Image (cartoon, rainbow, N blue to C red):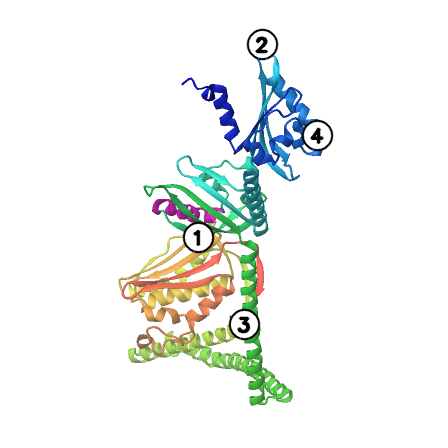
Amino acid sequence: MNDPQWDEPALLRLLVGSVEDYAIFVLDPEGHVRTWNAGAERIKGWPAEEIVGRHFSTFYLEADIEAGKPAFELREATATGRFEEEGWRLRRDGTRFWANVLITALRNPAGDLVGFAKVTRDLSERRKTEETLAESERRLREAQTISRMGDWQWDVATDQVTWSEGLYRVYGLRPEDFDGTLAAFLSHVHPDDRATTRAQVEAAYANGTTFDFEERILRPDGEVRTLQSRGRAVTDDDGKVFRLVGICIDITERKEAELRRAELIREQAAREEAEQQAEEFEQMMEELAISNEQLTVRTDEAERARADAERASLAKSQFLANMSHELRTPLNAIAGYTDLLDLEVHGPIVDAQRQALRRIQRNQRHLLSLINDLLNFSKLTAGRVSYSLTAVPIASVFEDLEGLVGLQVQRKGLVLDAPPPPPTMAVRADPEKLVQVLLNLLTNAVKFTDSGGRVSLTAQAADGRATIEVKDTGRGIPADRLDSIFDPFVQVHSEDTLGEGAGLGLAIARELARGMGGDLTVSSQPDVGSTFRVTLPVAGPVERRRSDGP
């Protein structure tokens, strides 16, 4: 096409002149405006006839002109071929707009500078949008700071966790202290809550759901804070989860306030209950009409009753002691005369007379045993038994016991198994009372073991305690009687022992064992046998003590 109006320069002028979104114009080498398009008039407000020939500094703020900014921009464009920036510019009416400016140096084929091309875009709307966004972000940061809140997101594919500035403050961390992974995220959760937090996150990821739970975190300074964590899974068009987003709100103060409120409620309830109880007590006191004088009278009566009981107990002990002495005298006389008769000092006696004599001797010994048991029990209950604790060799005790019960064992046809303990094995005890306890146990074992049975006496020591066992193969003790076997006046086989004792032997034996710092226990099985165990401390320094009563 050869039409001059469609040649290249004409088309270029038409194109430039028609553009309205950009201010496009030419400056001479000194910066004066030489051309002006429609976009320049629309953006800057000057018609061509008013601005052509004027210096381009007309569009700059006074402070920029004083700082030499227009000249600087031309120098930069001349030196490098172009200059670009964003900044404030003026319109014809004096208002400002935010502009993107591009200045390009124009040179002829010889390389000489002939001017500058300048293109300006009005970015005021974008600038306003950016400022609005920045303001929103600032307000968000302030809101997060005030509310102790922060947000986060987790990119599942890269395992990249991103925190907001507010969340760093919540956790008390700096960005350089956080690795930005889910594992690092969870490492700051309190150890006791870590498994629950992981389960919540994994469930949201697996199911594409939301989550809302409380957790505790451990800050670097050791402080524990409570957070409310909320969030959701983000899915792509195929429904696959690729990101989790959430917020964390520090609710520590709220939780503490709730705890304080609950405590106040409990305290109030306790006060109300106490007040109600006080009212009920006052009402009860009014109904009973108990005066201080009446209470004093009752206290005096109780004190007199206690004193009377003590006097009665003392009188009982004295009575038993006196009676035992009075009874022993005729019993000893009976024993002496029966012994003389048994020796036929006053002449020979026939068999019938000898059998009667044996019955007298047996009943005399029985009565004397009863008297001794009652006297011992009375002393024990009154706390008037003293103990001479010393180192007692167990071997010597066993030797004495064999001599005391050997004849009974032989007459009944039993086997006595009493292996001698090591000579060095000793217990801290009162020798006489220890023999008394063990003799009682051996006598019972012989009494309740049928002919052909076995009675054993053994001892062993461990951990500072010695255990002496008396074991028999007799009829045993029923299970329902084991708890009461050591009670006073209790006889296990009362049908077989009627008239043979008062049921005080085991009660006295246990109290004596305990008075020496030990104990007496029993285990038994009917028709198999019984085992009585006396435990005492191993031998130590000689000590003398007085019982304070059972």
Whether 503 is drawn above or below 186: the answer is below
User: What residue is at 45 percent from the left and 66 percent from the top?
Assistant: 436
Q: Position of residue 420 (x, y in %)?
A: 40, 52
Residue located beneath label 3 in the image: 269
Q: Which mark is residue 110?
A: 2
Q: Is residue 327 magenta?
A: no
The reply to whether the C-beta atoms of the residues labelled 1 and 2 are less than 8 Å apart is no
> Which amino acid, mark 3?
Ala
Marks 1/3: CA distance? 33 Å
Marks 4/3: CA distance? 78 Å
Front label number (4 vs 3): 4
Front label number (1 vs 3): 1
Marks 1/2: CA distance? 73 Å
SS type, badge 1? strand
Q: Nearer the viewer, residue 296 or 366?
A: 296
Whether 533 is drawn above or below 141: the answer is below
Q: Which mark is residue 212?
A: 1
Q: Nearer the viewer, residue 477 or 84?
A: 84
Residue located beneath label 4 in the image: 65
User: What residue is at 64 percent from the left and 37 percent from the top?
Assistant: 92
Segment colored magenta: 190-207
> Which amino acid, mark 1?
Asp
Whether 480 is drawn above or below 465: the answer is below
Front label number (2 vs 3): 2
Marks 4/2: CA distance? 32 Å
SS type, badge 2? loop
> Which amino acid, mark 4?
Ile
Q: Residues within 10 Å of mark 3 (few under 14, many from 20)?
A: few
| Lower position in the chain sequence, tag 1 or tag 3 | 1
Q: Is residue 67 visible?
A: yes
